[in-house]
Amino acid sequence: LRAASPRSAPMGKKKEKKDKKKKKKEEKKKKDKKKKDRKAKKSKTQGSSSSSSSTGNSSASVSPPVEKSEPPKKRKKEKEKEKEEAKEVLGDIIRMVDLAPPEEGIRRFIYEAEESGPLGLRMSGGFPPLILAVIDGSLAQKKGIPANWEVHAVNGHALVPQNHEVVMGCLKSRPVALDVRPQGWKPIEKVREMERRREREEAEKAARVELEEQRRELVAREAAEQAERDAAERAVREEQERIEHEQLAKRAREQVARQRAKEEEFERELRSDPEELRRDAEALMQAQYGSDVTFSSRRRGLPLRLVTRRKEVAWLWAGEVQELIGQGAQEEPADTWS
């Protein structure tokens, strides 16, 4: 029993030596067979000549029965057939030697020329076929062919629909090399290509991520700079508004102070007249229309200035122009006529 290992070079050398020895043995067998055929032919020819001479000398003696020799054409065909079979066996052996070593992950099992009979495998249909089971006690079990693996190639022919007839012919003959692979196996070149593609995609992804990070950092930096500028502008604007507010407040205080000074001066002017006259002017202004007013003082009249020194009738009051009488909002009259 022998299973070829795809990774052991010494095993391959041993196999070549064994194949050479086998070839020499077969050639030796052929030579021995040829010699035997020649000897048998000579013995047949001598037997026929001796029988003819004995019949001529004594007619009374009975010659022993002689086997009928096969026709020369038939013998020639058989020899040609044997030569063709030997050539086929030799060709199969040469093909076994010339087979390229299996790829990484693939196991090779060889059925030798003397290992005839079924393979001992139950396989599914389709391409590539799946080894459903290994029959107990079969050659496949002895060789250690694993179940649930896929048949990759037979004698180096890939298991594809185009090679169906060639593969079937190889399975019927011996020796035959059976390459099997685990499910999901991919050629090493394809795996490397996939790894290169994955590495390239990862590199591109990393480059995109790096660019995105740089863009985000740039955006964040610009946003921070803009925030600093906005804060500086806001601080300047707030300071300017504060200064303007202080100036307005200062002007307002100054204006209020000036107005208060004017009012105080105006009140002093109002208080410059005698108290009696001021009381009489107040009583006159408060009296109803058409009623009599008695002055406390003995004077016949009052100075006009005392009457105009009231805010509701004055044109100017503490230096401020007053609203004219009747200039305010008026209500609609209750009665109208045309």
Image (cartoon, grey):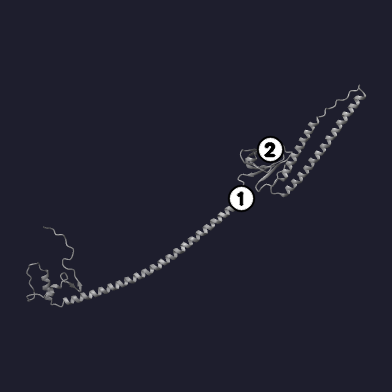
Residue under circle 2?
A: 169
Compared across the picture, whether 97 is left or right of 39 comes to left
* Image coordinates for residue 7, horizontal then vertical, percent: 69, 49
Tell me the residue at 84%/35% (across/down).
Answer: 38
Q: Reply above or below: 306 against 181.
A: below
Residue under circle 1?
A: 191
Compute the Cα span from label 2 to label 1: 32 Å
Residue flagged by tag 1: what amino acid is it?
Val
Closer to the camera, 169 or 317?
169
- Asked which secondary structure carries label 1, the reply is helix
Closer to the camera, 268 or 90?
90
Compared across the picture, whether 2 is left or right of 262 comes to right
Residue flagged by tag 2: what amino acid is it?
Gly
Q: Is residue 226 visible?
A: yes
Closer to the camera, 303 or 36?
36
Q: Quadrant of residue 294?
A: bottom left
Q: Reply above or below: 16 against 336.
A: above
* Image coordinates for residue 335, horizontal then vertical, percent: 12, 58
Q: Is residue 129 visible?
A: no
Q: Earlier in the sequence, mark 2 or mark 1?
A: 2
